[in-house]
Amino acid sequence: IFEDEASLDESNFDPDDEYDDDGNSAKYRIDVGRGGKNAILYLNDIEKDPEYRSWPTSMQQMFYSSQFGGAPTVRRNLFTLLIVIDPASNTHHPAVDVAAQLLNSQFPLRLGVLIVDNYDVSNGTPSAPFTWNRGERPFHSRDSFLLMQHITKKYGGIAAVSCLLRVLNDTSDLEEKLSVGDYIGMHVALLAAMNVIGSGREDLVQKEMEDLLKAGESEGLGSKANDSKKEPKYENAVQFALDKMIHPGMSFLNGIPLPESNDMRSFGMGVNDILQYEQRHIMELAMKGVITDTAPRSVYATILSGDHLFKQFHPLLRESNKEYLLLGSKSDESSLIFTSSDAVLNCDIDAIFVVEGVFDLDNADGVEAALSFLDVIISPPETWHDSKAVSAAFRIHHFATPTKPTSLVLSNLFCHASSFDVADIKAVTAALYKQADNEDVRGVIEVIKKITTLKKDVNDQIVQLVGKREICPPANARKSPSTEQKNFYTANGRVYVPYGNPSISAVDIKMIINLEMHRANAMTKLLLPHLLPPSFVATGEVAHFDSRLIHNAVGKSLTILNEIMSTSNSKSKNVSSEISRN
């Protein structure tokens, strides 16, 4: 696609990559297809649009063409490119150039666009429609959405694609936004130049589009057709972007994220690599009979499946380097917290995880993050992984040695967390969060005594514990995360630092578990048979105490292994010494 092609060097090789059935390094995909019916505008359809009637319908002919260096031209939607754009930003999107080149070369590409305003996605809600103001106000991405939808339905996909590509190209270098009236005029002029609308009808078409945008901004959001649940709406587009964690500037080929780079050479190399990979993948599916001249009905749905498919484009997937940390080498099983479903191990477990939160308990933000972590533990999802049985234990660390009475008490409580119900731990944490200005431990204890939701024996046990004024060891990582944050999380050592708000959600934890599943599954199956107590033979289950010991052992072993495998050779000896100390 790009003239300046170069092969990717070995620095792009990740030793932790998984492989597909044919031994090729597998690329992950984002499911940007499902749920997008009422949000994404698909501008063309290779299988249905009349413009593609002359294309061959035989996959065999496509094979012949490809063997001799031609495009894999066939009347099937073999490739779907989704471009997330904010036309009103006047920003050039390089994936638009990719789409133009592929379509011009008769590449079987279905083009979808998710048109959303950058501000609306960042703000988490669509902007309210603007007043018309005689068409003199700046155009908004909502206007572009409605125009593309209208042109596709009335004048066809080819006209819509041509308008989109040309208008985006012509407006990308403008210093100021066009007025909505001028923006409509650009589309009308292009349709006239393509002879899509008859000579002399420009004014009528202009008025028709103006009326459309005026109606689209009314309280009813336009015609009944646009109010139908089956019709894409701008509001749905914004919600889809939020649900999938995507934003303008991103693009996906059959779900594989294209590079986000201002360096065109780097972008071109990345795109070429993905195109070559995906063409091989499609050819392999065709050779195996998965894709034929008539089946499956949706090639896109078939491709968006498997273990390397993720429901969201989570920030963890965009990390250039994985980071692993061993936390609290002196921490033992007494600090582990379980959900009710994970308290007992059984023989069906595929992978063990220890998920740890590190918080600056001297700071209100750190305590808030700890509360959100406890909320996830109290109300976990039904499963932590879609296909593997996971048993997870949780642990909370103080980032550093406590300097305040409240943080000292909380640190000691978390250090002995396995002795208490997680709901009681949260009740104490929430109460102390509201009374964080106590000047001594006695004042903190008085706050705990007044918590009415705690049973008396539990309250007495907690008071006795925190009254000892022990100093529980802090996280004590050999290094901080590269971001130097004081609030972060790990899963079997894999670091996750949330962007902006330090709180975590079940979605975040599920993503870390998904990314670390391959090694966790292998190591759990290797280690678990050697750690199971004799009682397991008789009952098939592991008691709560033994379960804590096993989770702690497997979690630390996996963390040390992950660190060793992610650390350079010059540092691996220092990391390896942890094995003897643990």
Image (cartoon, grey):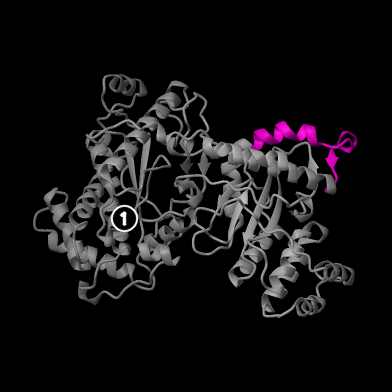
What residue range appears in magenta?
A: 520-544
Nearer the observer, 479 or 48: 479
Return the x and y of residue 41 as percentages of the image width and height: 35, 51
Left or right position of 214 against 439: left
Image quadrant holding the N terminus, namely top left
Q: Given the image, on which type of amino acid does mark 1 rest?
A: Gln
Q: Which residue is mark 1?
A: 149
Can the viewer see residue 28 in this picture? yes
Left or right position of 36 against 460: left
From this view, report whether residue 476 is shown above or below residue 366: above
Name the residue: 54% across, 46% down: 323
From this view, report whether residue 335 is shown above or below residue 21: below
Magenta stretch prevailing secondary structure? helix
Name the residue: 63% across, 61% down: 399
Return the x and y of residue 351 as percentages of the image width and height: 68, 39
Nearer the observer, 105 or 527: 527
Q: Is residue 541 magenta?
A: yes
From this view, report whether residue 375 is shown above or below residue 109: below
Return the x and y of residue 15 as percentages of the image width and height: 51, 33
From this view, report whether residue 423 is shown above or below residue 387: below
Left or right position of 496 against 329: left
Can the viewer see residue 125 in this picture? no
Q: Quadrant of residue 554?
A: top right
Image quadrant holding the C terminus, namely top right
Q: Is residue 155 magenta?
A: no
Q: Quadrant of residue 134?
A: bottom left
Q: Residues within 10 Å of mark 1 (few under 14, many from 20)?
A: many
Nearer the observer, 61 or 316: 316
Return the x and y of residue 439 as percentages of the image width and height: 71, 80
